[in-house]
Amino acid sequence: MSEISYYLLDTETNGTKSAGYWHEITQISIIRASDRVQLNKYIRIEHPERTNPDALSYTGRTMADLDKGEFKKVVVDFCNAFFEEDGKAPEERCIIGHKIISFDKRFLHALWESLGYTFPANLWLDTHTYVKDYVKKHNLGKQKLDLDNALILVGGKPKEGSHNAVIDTQNNYMLWDKLKKEGIAALPHIKRFAHKVGEDD
């Protein structure tokens, strides 16, 4: 799949409810795998009163922090321009993340849809399921496979500062790269989820 452009992506949010964009993305970070250029943006949320305190504790942020950053349309337009630099169509872009399909994808689709946009990538690779093939290959039994532990498992050294999208994206890049070098096939784990406005994830 040499024609595919790969992007490592992570978000932080102020809760877990993506439907109707009830909870919002507060930070987004993207690494373009082809040149390892990294984008990072904080988003000023629209409804701080909906914030789940547990989410703030998880990310180490405060309510005051949620008023910082840029407006969501500015960030989304910037991200779209970043993606479009590759000259590819959504069918030729793959987004890589840890539990990306079960969590981040829902919020990304909701954010883009809140602006009347469709998310510009249709392919998704979850490193949480991808690393399980490494575990099977080496007969490692039951393992704790959060991002940091998964990276340690494959011989990597996580950067400190987890639950910050910049650091998590960098750690996930290292995990993905090590799995590739180990010869673990990614193709069976790439799933297609084209964003259609008006359809719930």
Image (cartoon, rainbow, N blue to C red):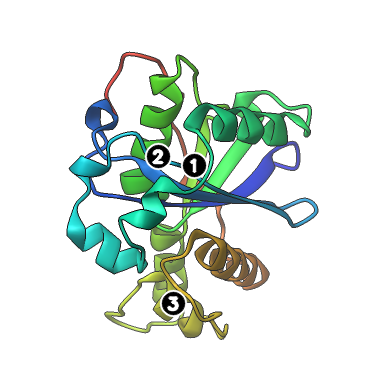
- How many angstroms separate mark 3 from mark 2 (CA)? 20 Å
Q: Which is more N-terminal, label 3 or label 1?
A: 1
Q: Give the class, few, some or many, for how many residues have Cα within 10 Å of label 2's Cα (few <14, many ≥20).
A: many
- How many angstroms separate mark 1 from mark 3 (CA)? 20 Å
Q: Amino acid at mark 3?
A: Asp
Read off the residue under disc 2. 105
For the C terminus, the image quarter is top left
Vertical arrangement, residue 76 with respect to residue 42, above or below: above
Name the residue: 36% across, 55% down.
64
Q: Classify residue 38 by image quadrant.
A: bottom right
Q: How far across and how far down the image is residue 5, in percent? A: 70, 40
- How many angstroms separate mark 1 from mark 2 (CA)? 9 Å
Q: How far across and how far down the image is residue 98, in percent? A: 43, 58
Q: Give the class, few, some or many, for how many residues have Cα within 10 Å of label 3's Cα (few <14, many ≥20).
A: some
Q: Which mark is residue 144?
A: none
Label total for image? 3
Name the residue: 19% across, 41% down.
50
Helix, strand or loop at mark 2:
helix
Q: Which mark is residue 148?
A: 3
Residue 13 vs residue 148, the one in the foreground: 13
Helix, strand or loop at mark 3:
helix
Left or right: where 181 falls relative to 105: right
Q: Amino acid at mark 1?
A: Trp
Q: Give the class, few, some or many, for how many residues have Cα within 10 Å of label 1's Cα (few <14, many ≥20).
A: many
In the image, which is nearer the foreground, mark 1 or mark 2?
Answer: 2
Q: How far across and how far down the image is residue 29, in percent? A: 56, 52
Helix, strand or loop at mark 1:
strand
Read off the residue under disc 1. 124
